[in-house]
Amino acid sequence: MSTRIVVLVSGAGTNLQALIDACADPAYGARIAAVGADRDGIEGLARADRAGIATFVARVGDFSSREHWDRALADKVAAFEPDLVVLAGFMKLVSEDFLARLTTVNTHPALCPAFPGTNGPAAALAYGVKVTGATLFVVDGGIDTGPIVAQVAVPVEDDDDVESLHERIKVAERQMLVDAVGRIARDGLVVEGRKVRIGTPAP
């Protein structure tokens, strides 16, 4: 039986598209039950529509408080009974109540714990590191602080600017996400404190 995934997006949905493409192969082990967004009219929702995947929107401005929005979003996601929630360019923070209900992973365009926040590639370039990359982590209550599922390294070239570096990171990030989500779907995810293992515990 396929692992059920809900993907949350805020923009173009390139990571979502990579997951849609991967899920087309039954051997991948996962299927996208729904795609949710925090805004209307984005390409990410259009990608889901073209693939015949259910969609929903929960806009913060439509609710009386951020907490009300967060509860409503969690309810909308939970209605699809996902085994895993993937934040794929979702530009809103979710609460610890949301995370207690729904196992959620996210990517960050740096090698955590280095360079958290919204400017990972620029911060890495400014610091002068020779290697940066991308991280897939289990979301917790912090900013890019959750237990690490997978990482991929990306060399920083001498002639890189923020755009060229970020573009190479995004390519590596997409492949890492697809590989890791497929492995989680097929083998399961075990989180023990800061330690994350894909696969069931040894007997």
Image (cartoon, rainbow, N blue to C red):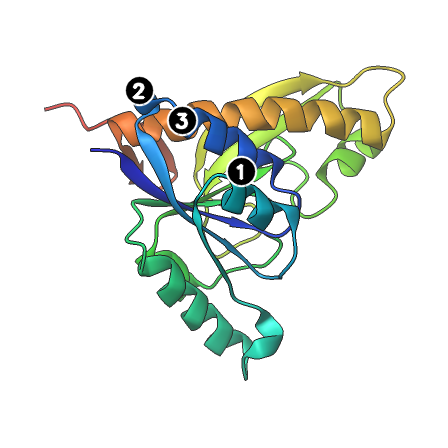
The quarter of the image holding the N terminus is: top left
Query: Would you say residue 128 is visible in this rendering?
Result: no
The residue located at (33%, 32%) in the rendering is 30
Numbered disc in front, either 3 or 2 = 3
Query: Would you say residue 84 is visible in this rendering?
Result: yes
The residue located at (19%, 28%) in the rendering is 201
Q: Position of residue 107 (x, y in %)?
A: 55, 38
Residue extending farthest left: 203
Left or right of 197 in this view: 6: right
Left or right of 79 in this view: 43: right
Q: Position of residue 25 (x, y in %)?
A: 37, 22
| Residue matched to label 2 | 27
Numbered disc in front, either 1 or 3 = 3
Q: CA distance from mark 2 to mark 1?
A: 18 Å
The residue located at (65%, 44%) in the rendering is 116
| Residue matched to label 3 | 24
The amino acid marked with disc number 2 is Ala
